[in-house]
Amino acid sequence: MESKLWFPTRHCFNSCYSFARLRFIWAILVLCAAVTSLALFALFNSGLPGQAEIICKPQLTVDPFDPRQAVNGPPTRSFRGQSRYHNLCNDTKYITSWGSGGWSNDVISIINLIYLGLVTDRIPILPIFLPSHLLLNTLGNAYSALNFRDVFDLPRLRKATGIPVLEWWNVKASNSTDLGCWNVWESVQYHEKAPRQSFAPWKLGLDISYTKTPDWVKMLFLVPRVPTTRAANLIEPRPSPKHNVSPPPDEDLLCYDFLYHVAAHQADEIALDYSPAWRYVGAHMHWTPILDRLGDTYIRQTLELRSTDPIPPVVHVRHNGFADWCEEGFSTDCLAPMSAIERRVREVQEEIAEHKGITHVILTSDEKNSTWWQEVYDLGWFRPDHSRTKELYRDWYPILIDAVIQSKSAGFVGTARTTMSILWVESWQDGAARMVQWGKPGADDH
């Protein structure tokens, strides 16, 4: 049989040509994809994190103690208004009060305020410090308002207590706002016929209408906030001084005129070792780093130490803090004599000498008698030099620096009714303390 060569037909030729062209196009696409993949691989390896890095990278978290989480935004003209454009969150309760008892007593009032915030699930709004011995103290003189954050480490306190403690500047500007508050002072001080007066609301732009609490509030302090008890004990509020309005005590922002005397079990318990307000709040109110270092500087200057020398343990003595309580003409016999102070200092030195070796004694006082101070120097004791403190810093700083020095002492000797200093020494320094009794001749004899 004759063999024949096979040639593709025209139709077959066209089909094969189309198939080859398709294969060529696919090859081009694969090549482009490969080049693109290679380029992306190089790009990701050179500048962008891999998948493992993205998965392992910690996510940004919101600080639960940031004060901005406790308000709606920046300070507003008023924390509430007719259109409810206030800066306080609708789903949050708050508590506030004022100070008017002198700096140390106002610190205790703030400790009680924060503690009440803890036990009532309310966010405290802290007042400003104002010098109670100057009535018109906010008219631009050196004794201007002092913010809590200028004295105490507020971020550290927020973390320790677990609540985003606020100051009034976080909440509102200085525009006047009406607020209904409880008047505790008149209920616990039976000779008083008005709320405890304070310049803090005026300085903060708050026009307060006070409602007197029932007399039994001294034993059941938080009961008036219970709705049924609140309704049964509401009386006609005292009109506010500026706008002459009488709103009842605010329910969202619980407000009191004075909290110094608040206690969980008995009066003046803040100085006792079981005090819940001190244990859960006061013990965590540490100085700002700047103020803490300033206290160290003054201790070194007082003891003539170099900046590199370690600060030795000292005994701090406070004198004359309550001279104004003495009857007129009897202050000399009312206050404790130097012999009583010296005896108490020796007791403290002997108690802590075994493990701390105390040899330095620093005494602070507003005593003006140069003869009295010479007795101090003759005993080999030291006195901080505040001759330029107000000039270098502010009028507040002699008081603040003395408080820091007190808190850093291994031992403390104070006049009876001193509270904060003994707490700092015993709680922070595990130190020894004595109180010099006063009020009459021989009050401290023992």
Image (tube, rainbow, N blue to C red):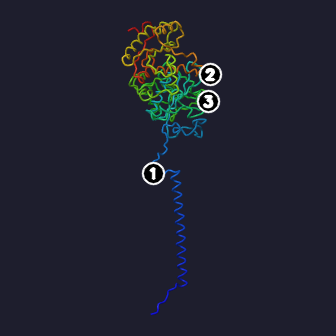
Disc marking residue 141: 2
**Figure quadrant of the N terminus:** bottom left
Q: Residue at x 45, y 48 (%)?
A: 56
Count the numbered circles shown: 3
Counting residues from the start of the chain, the first of labels 3 and 2 encountered is 2
Q: Amino acid at mark 1?
A: Ala
Front label number (2 vs 1): 1
Q: Which residue is mark 1?
A: 52
Query: In the picture shown, does residue 336 fall above or below 120?
Result: above
- Between 329 and 142, the one lying in front of the other is 142
Query: In the picture shown, does residue 299 fall above or below 85?
Result: above
Counting residues from the start of the chain, the first of labels 2 and 1 encountered is 1
Mark 1 residue element: helix
Q: Horizontal and vertical percent for residue 28?
A: 54, 68
Q: Which residue is mark 3?
A: 243
Q: Residue at x 52, y 55 (%)?
A: 42
Q: CA distance from mark 1 to mark 3?
A: 64 Å
Q: CA distance from mark 2 to mark 1?
A: 61 Å
- Badge 2: residue crowd in 10 Å (few <14, some 14–19, many ≥20): few
Disc marking residue 307: none
Q: Amino acid at mark 3?
A: His
Q: Amino acid at mark 2?
A: Asn
Mark 2 residue element: loop
Left or right, 392 with respect to 306, comes to: right
- Between 75 and 93, the one lying in front of the other is 75
